[in-house]
Image: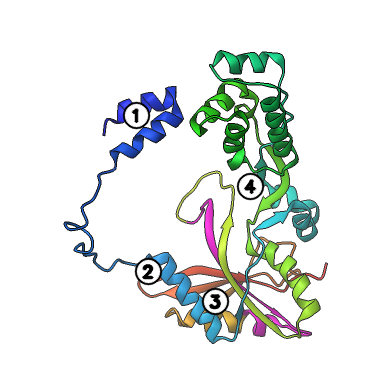
């Protein structure tokens, strides 16, 4: 594989380089290879092993699994944190952005450019091309179908259609993303409030739910305890009456005993997140015999009615 040649060609003609890369694949001989190939058993990843153990532990404790929303509107974060939302949480959130769908005109200069590239174009093809761009603007046509539909409108190959889009309509290539008010979930609680609002209207209490899924946080620097994306193992209890002992301490101990911890400390958390009732946010420490030290493992509290 001549990598320099491929890269050079890709910069000049991306579509042609992609097509020619198919010639690099060696044709296999059925009598010499499959099914005589033998694969050894692979190894699972410790992260997924831990998630599997956590799921088993939650299920044994009588919790049912939930899948919480991943996309959180910033207004939901304001509901949880009030005026503290921008500096405390939204500063650490990733906002979703998307490319706009522009109005693409087909003027005389563009028609002449297409002709200059050696492509035949007439009023019927121009009308079809305008219809394609109109569908793209209004969302009837997905972006991944744009090259195909442009090629069909002009009655040319896909490779030629991509070349015309790139050269004649640079406004598509030059599009800049526009941010929305939707954030990626930075902590599981932001999703629980949305889920529980729906659940309590349709389900009888008590509710015991858990969720293990990804969260995303815009950390300024990544290290062993600060990651841009991480998995959060989270559970909730909903009932007419819930106490810290029943809803936090007892469950923390029962869950962590499954992983070999036997000594626990419960310490008031100084962060005081606004979605917890004051004086209920608690850090959970477990004694790690191999490290010979106390390790912070979890946090719990009573959700604020506010």
Q: Which residue is mark 1?
A: 6
Q: CA distance from mark 2 to mark 3?
A: 16 Å
Residue at (26% x, 34% y) in the render: 1
Q: Label 1: how many residues lie within 10 Å, few (<14), some (14-19) or many (20+)?
A: some
Q: Which residue is mark 2?
A: 291
Question: What is the span of residues highlighted in magenta in the rendered image?
Answer: 225-248
Percent x, y for residue 168? 60, 21
Q: Which mark is residue 167?
A: none
Residue closer to the observer: 80 or 290:
80
Q: Earlier in the sequence, mark 1 or mark 4?
A: 1
Percent x, y for residue 55? 51, 76
Answer above or below: position of 263 versus 167.
below
Q: Earlier in the sequence, mark 1 or mark 3?
A: 1
Q: Earlier in the sequence, mark 1 or mark 2?
A: 1
Numbered disc 3: secondary structure: strand
Numbered disc 2: secondary structure: loop
Q: CA distance from mark 1 to mark 4?
A: 35 Å
Q: Which residue is mark 4?
A: 94
Q: Which residue is mark 3?
A: 265
Magenta residue check for 246: yes
Q: Nearer the viewer, mark 1 or mark 3?
A: 1
Q: Earlier in the sequence, mark 4 or mark 3?
A: 4
């Amino acid at each position: 594989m001549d990598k320099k040649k491929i890269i050079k060609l890709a910069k000049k003609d991306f579509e042609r380089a992609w097509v020619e890369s198919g010639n690099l694949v060696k044709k296999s001989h059925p009598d010499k290879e499959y099914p005589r190939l033998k694969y050894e058993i692979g190894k699972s990843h410790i992260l997924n092993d831990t998630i599997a153990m956590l799921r088993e532990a939650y299920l044994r404790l009588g919790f049912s699994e939930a899948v919480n929303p991943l996309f959180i509107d910033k207004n939901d974060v304001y509901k949880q944190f009030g005026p503290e939302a921008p500096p405390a949480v939204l500063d650490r959130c990733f906002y979703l952005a998307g490319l706009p769908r522009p109005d693409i005109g087909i003027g005389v200069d563009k028609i002449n450019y297409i002709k200059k590239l050696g492509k035949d174009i007439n009023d019927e093809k121009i009308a079809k091309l305008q219809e394609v761009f109109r569908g793209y603007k209004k969302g009837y046509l997905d972006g991944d179908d744009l090259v195909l539909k442009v090629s069909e409108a002009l009655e040319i190959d896909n490779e030629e259609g991509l070349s015309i889009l790139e050269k004649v309509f640079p406004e598509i290539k030059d599009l800049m993303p526009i941010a929305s008010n939707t954030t990626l979930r930075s902590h599981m609680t932001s999703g629980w409030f949305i889920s529980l609002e729906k659940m309590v209207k349709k389900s009888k209490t008590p509710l015991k739910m858990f969720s293990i899924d990804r969260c995303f946080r815009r950390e300024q620097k990544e290290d062993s305890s600060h990651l841009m994306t991480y998995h959060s193992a989270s559970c909730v209890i909903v009932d007419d009456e819930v106490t810290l002992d029943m809803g936090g301490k007892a469950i923390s101990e029962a869950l962590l005993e499954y992983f070999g911890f036997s000594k626990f400390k419960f310490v008031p958390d100084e962060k005081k997140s606004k979605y917890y009732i004051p004086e209920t946010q608690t850090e959970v420490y477990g004694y790690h015999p191999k490290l010979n030290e106390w390790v912070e493992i979890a946090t719990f509290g009573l959700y604020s009615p506010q």
